[in-house]
Image: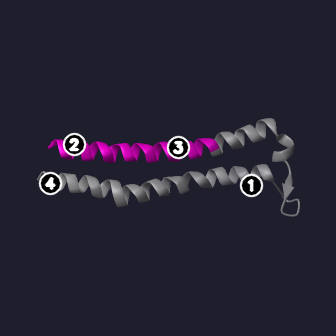
Amino acid sequence: MSSDDEAELQRIVARRGRLGAALTAIMMTAYFGFILLVAFAKPTAGQLLAGERVSLGIVLGAGVIVLAPILTAVYVRWANRHYDAAIRTLRERHK
């Protein structure tokens, strides 16, 4: 593998790491924000919405649950379009 290819591989891997870190930070912020809301702002979390049928805490909790597969889909889509294609290109150069 040439030094140019190694540099390209390092760039691709670093980009994947940055994306993974960003998506992880988003998920952790949402999760811990929700946990802190429930722990320290119970009246806010218990505030009723939708004609007093559901609490803000339930809505936000469901949002956190829905966010996880959305972020996973973002990563998978990026990996399929960019990461896998770039790795495939590097492999084909060395056949």
Q: Residue at x 48, y 57 (%)?
A: 74
| Residue at the spot of label 1 | 59
| Mark 1 burial class by Cα count in 10 Å: few <14, some 14-19, many 20+ | some
Q: Which kind of residue does numbered mark 1 sit on?
A: Val
Residue segment shown in magenta: 1-29
Image coords of residue 87 (percent x, y): 26, 52
Q: Image quarter for residue 93?
A: bottom left
Q: Image quarter for residue 10?
A: top left
Q: Are marks 2 and 3 in contact (CB under 8 Å)?
A: no
The secondary structure making up most of the magenta span is: helix
Q: Residue 55 vs residue 30: left or right?
A: right
At mark 1, the secondary structure is helix
Image coords of residue 82 (percent x, y): 35, 57
Measure the C-alpha gap from mark 2 to mark 3.
27 Å
Q: Residue at x 38, y 47 (%)?
A: 15
Q: Which kind of residue does numbered mark 2 sit on?
A: Glu
Q: Are marks 1 and 2 in contact (CB under 8 Å)?
A: no
| Residue at the spot of label 4 | 93
